[in-house]
Image (tube, rainbow, N blue to C red):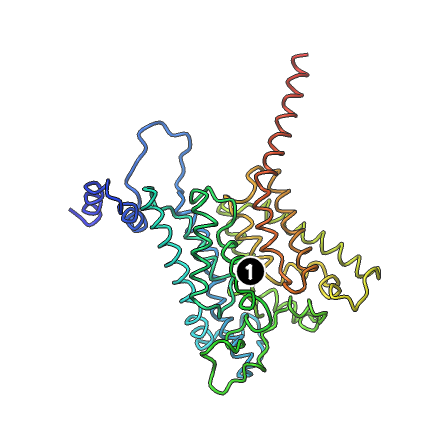
Amino acid sequence: MGLKEKLHSFKEKNRNKKWIPAFNAIHTFLYLPNETTHNGTHIKAADDLKRTMNTVIMAMVPCLLFGMFNAGYQHHLALGEIQAVSGGFLSAEFWTLDNFMVGFWKIIPLVIVSYGVGLLIEFIFAIINKHEVEEGYLVTGMLVPLIVPIDIPLWMLAVAVIFGVVIGKEVFGGTGMNILNPALTIRAFLFFAYPTWMSGDKVWVHGADPRVQDLAAGAQPDAISGETILGSLAQNNTSMIDTTADIWNAFLGFIPGSIGETSTLLILLGGLFLIFSKIGSWRIMLSSVMGAIVMGLIFNFVADSGIISESSKFYGLMNTTFWHHLLIGGFAFGTVFMATDPVTASQTNKGKWIYGFLVGFISIMIRVFNPAYPEGVMLAILLMNVFAPTIDHYVIQGNVKKRMKRLKVKTA
């Protein structure tokens, strides 16, 4: 009898034990389930929840690896130890082992805490409620480290993960029942509970924040800048994105920011992979971009018409070229990996267009009108998560009314 057969036999003998859901989770993670349906099936497919989650994780791996290199690069650049990259993805000063190791030793602990704490909570609730451990947290566990500052204390992340999994997911019934995206719920908790660790010009570059104890020897933390492009624009300073080189750096990702959100190019490739694998909704992605462009054009018109003065605190972001908004901040990452969450997004095709458009539209609106926190995609997605069921309801009711009208015409 092989190991797989022994584990299956052990599972059968102990199927009534309280702790068996935890064993089943580990068992199905290592092996494919050996259960088959005994009744007639309506849909046959090779994918399951675990494969779907793993596909999304694969789409994020390039962002994770790039984030490790960029974390080390931004750290050394802020300390003045290296010069800014000049050859883009072919630059030797970026793809160095030293850059990678700095990022690796800062990011891997975030991944471990995210998965360790999150899965522990999932196991506890599975045992208490006597149901199987579901694979829904596999994606959330990867998303969380990619959307937080690199120097966020691990205990803060652990507390936020507990809150996000319990309040944002388990109280609604677990995977497939939550109304808010769990990863964004975790980030929202961090932002409102520990705002000084989630905003400002010191939190995005390792070693820039004087509260971090493992600074490089001889560094002067108060003199290190970790300001993002959004932060600069919010202060009416356009110097960080006023040349073609700046725009390319923003597109490729050689800028400060959350770990996985800087490279629009890699996020775009990940989005195409999700669309090709039929997991991500192209309707939501495209409509979100359309909504952001429309809002950006409106603000550009207002800035160019002189309605708002150049001294206004809103002018910098309002005057930002509309398509630049797509390259900076977390807009691209949120649109591809979080707005498209099939559980919390709209389910109907027409609803997806409305939902996505409003996500993009509101994201840029919040970004411009809240310069103290010049990033609106998190709040926009969470807001539309709440309204997604309402959108689907009215879309379905509209379809019902149309069919009823056609039925009355035929029977008349």
Q: Is residue 326 above or below residue 210?
A: above
The three-letter amino acid code for the residue at tag 1 is Phe
State left or right for residue 370 relative to residue 153: right
Residue at the outermost bottom position: 218
Residue at the outermost top position: 412
Q: How many discs appear?
A: 1
Q: Circle 1: is it few (<14), some (14-19), or many (20+) Cα within 10 Å?
A: few
- Between residue 192 and residue 15, name the one nearer to us: 192
State left or right for residue 113 relative to residue 206: left
Residue 389 x, y percent position in the rendering: 57, 39
Q: Is residue 404 above or below residue 155?
A: above
State left or right for residue 358 relative to residue 347: right
State left or right for residue 165 relative to residue 394: left
Residue at 65% across, 47% down? 358
Residue at 67% across, 53% down? 292
Residue 95 x, y percent position in the rendering: 49, 73
- Between residue 213 and residue 139, name the one nearer to us: 213
Residue at the outermost right position: 306
Residue 23 x, y percent position in the rendering: 27, 48
Residue at the outermost left position: 1
Residue 352 x, y percent position in the rendering: 60, 42
* Quarter the C terminus occupies: top right
Residue underneath mark 1:
192
Residue at 52% across, 58% down? 187
Residue at 50% across, 76% down? 211
Q: Indicate the secondary structure of the residue bearing disc 1.
A: helix
Q: Is residue 236 above or below residue 381?
A: below
Q: Is residue 373 above or below residue 101?
A: above
